[in-house]
Amino acid sequence: MPTITTLHVKMEGFTAFFRHPLTITGTQISLPCPPYSTLLGMLSAIAGMVITPADTRIGFEFKCSSKDIEIEKTDRLSLSKGVLTRHREGQGIIKRYIYFRPELDLYVTNLELEQAFLSPVSTPSFGRSQDIAWIKKVEKVQLTEMQSGKIGPTLIPEIKMNIPSLLVRCPEWFENNIEGRTRLAGTFGFYQGLLPTTKERFAVTMKNLYHPSNLADSDNVIYLHQWL
């Protein structure tokens, strides 16, 4: 079977939140796993330069110990004669579902990113800037291509009926190369997101499955994302 040498990076944090693109008001819900655009943004922050789909492929598993509602105060503003001022009713309160004690096992095919993980330029985060993450391990592992295997919590571009999950639609990356302009969304994809609180692994047959050499069970695989 073909093998690929990759970097395996183990990351942990206190909290994580990946906002669902369709929930702007009301109680905020989180995507079940970080979308690939968020992982590219994290890699860019760590490396101190823009990392694009042309620079690396990404595979990951995202787990957490629990999920619950967080309450946060917000500063509300109002516009008066072209000037932003504090809202007369004061601060607001927002509720959102967040993940506690998140863990990310990240696999990247660009070996040149190793030094960036060993000495990050910026602090990595699991979504928001306050969801600080830290790097526990950086190692080189071999990925062996498989036709089938058991996957853990991740995002896959196929629908498998035997997996408890959520279906999500989100961009694979954002373009941010024009100064002074808002970011432009890249290609959108449909994904099946496995729930991060799930302890089981699920048997699947699909393309781009690989067994990492750091996983003891030979049936365990990860999905190495093929960019759209």
Image: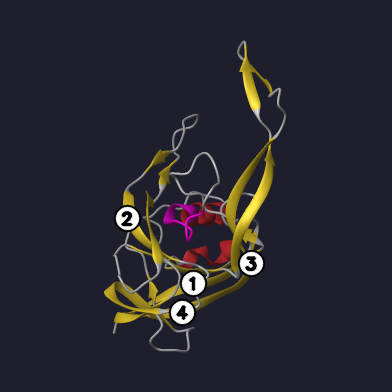
Q: Which mark is residue 41?
A: none
The local secondary structure at tag 1 comes to strand
Residue placed under numbered mark 1 in the picture: 7
Residue that appears at 67% across and 48% down: 71
Separation (CA) of disc 4 from disc 1: 24 Å
Separation (CA) of disc 1 from disc 2: 26 Å
- Residue type, label 3: Arg
Which is nearer the eye, 214 or 142? 214
Separation (CA) of disc 1 from disc 3: 23 Å
- Residue type, label 2: Phe
Is residue 199 found left or right of 121 in the rendered image? left
Mark 1 or 3: the one toward you? 3
Which label's residue is closer to the chain start, 4 or 3? 3
Dot 2 and dot 4 residues touching (CB under 8 Å)? no
Tell me where residue 53 appears, x and y as whole percent. Answer: 38, 55
Which is nearer the eye, 43 or 170? 170
Separation (CA) of disc 4 from disc 3: 18 Å
Q: Which mark is residue 190?
A: 2
Which label's residue is closer to the chain start, 1 or 2? 1
- Residue type, label 4: Glu
Is residue 98 found left or right of 204 in the rendered image? right
